[in-house]
Amino acid sequence: MRFTRFLLPALLSAACLFTLPASAQEAAKEKVLLDTDMVEMFDDGVAMTMLAAAPNVELLGVTTLSGNSWVQAGTAAALRQLEMVGAPNVPVAMGLEYPLRSDRHAMFKTERQLVGRGHDTWTGSFGLEKPQSWQAVYKSSYGSEPQLAPVDKHAVNFIIDTVRANPGEVTIAAIGPGGNLALAVRMAPDIVPLIKRVVYMGGSFFQQGNVTPAAEFNWYFDPEAARIAVRTPFKEQIILGLDVCEKVVFKKEHYDRLLKTLGDSPFAAMLRGTFVGQTFEKNAEFTHFVWDVLVSAVIIDPTLITEEVTRFVDVNDQPGLSYGQSLAYAEDAPAGAQKARIVKTVDTERFWNMLNELQYWNAAAKAGAAK
């Protein structure tokens, strides 16, 4: 049943792309809006690059916000990587600088003392100095003037306008804390039935969290936003949390394979310069995860999903030991909770093969060869 459910639509879609005229092929593409707390390469950067290059996806835009990085740094990284992948027409819109509970940064040290932490020491922008501007980050990080710039529109308004312009067609890939999406549906509730689906990287339903025993980083960063989002009655919600993400282990062999795929492209140098790359170079036994990349992968190819459950979901937005915890209910859920598909397993071998397909890296490789 699962084979038929996922494979048949993919085959039909592929067949249509081969037989339809160019205009119809464009119409048949999955329209995706990426909402992200961007970083270089793994994981948000790779997730964006794959969506920008996928032949069956039209990336309508990238909206940034603070989380893994400050929004200024994330915006600079998004623009640079779009330049590298040869996607100058993908608009980038800057969004929220702070989570909805805006005192989190000021109170974070106290919060950590009172709540403790989980196995992951990462704190994102809670532990980073706020940049002066996205331009300052770009010049400091890349040593040149940017070729692209963000659009003159806030990310929340960009989401609203994009959905209204493409009713029933937009898949939102929510791989950050979710504040932009939460405010968009609060400001313009008319867009809710117009959104095709939302695919999240967030939460941890059937195992412990990472930043605390109760919570996964994205939804811990802004539990109020995550709760607003998952309680919104979207047509479809798909969640890739730690339950699946921590089953896809990033090892030195995967790092080496990808570097070989990247060749002389600027992405290879960027990957080597990241924390992940530097650590792999020093310690071949190091392992990591690729979280957000899985969201892009299953949007591009839903047949990668091999196990999932449907549950009512909710997020704890009450400060305390379980702040940011994600919850799944088979029945008797709290009033207002919505159903979501929770992905538990993907085809890992096919995923790593997909990541190394040249179609995602060709434009950058050609640019590197031309230098």
Image (tube, grey):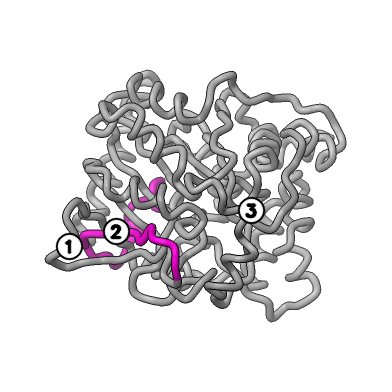
* Span highlighted in magenta in the image: 298-320
x, y percentage for residue 63? 52, 35
Quadrant that contains the C terminus: top right
Quadrant of residue 271 within the rendered picture: bottom right
**Is residue 311 a member of the stretch shown in magenta?**
yes
Q: Pointers 2 and 1 in contact (CB under 8 A)?
A: yes
Label 2 element class: strand
Amino acid bearing label 2: Asp
Q: Nearer the viewer, mark 1 or mark 3?
A: 3
Labels 3 and 2 touching (C-beta < 8 A)? no
Q: Nearer the viewer, mark 3 or mark 2?
A: 3
Measured as percent of width and height from the top left, residue 366 is found at 71, 37
**Mark 3–mark 2 distance (CA, rounded to whole Å):** 26 Å
How crowded is the residue under tag 1: few (<14 C-alpha within 10 Å), some, or many (20+)? some
> What residue sits right under mark 2 in the picture?
314
Question: Looking at the picture, does residue 265 appear above or below residue 221?
Answer: above
Mark on residue 106? Answer: 3
Label 2 Cα neighbours within 10 Å, binned few <14 / some 14-19 / many ≥20: many
Tell me residue 121's x, y (percent).
63, 70
**Type of residue at label 3?**
Ala
Judge whether residue 149 is colored magenta: no
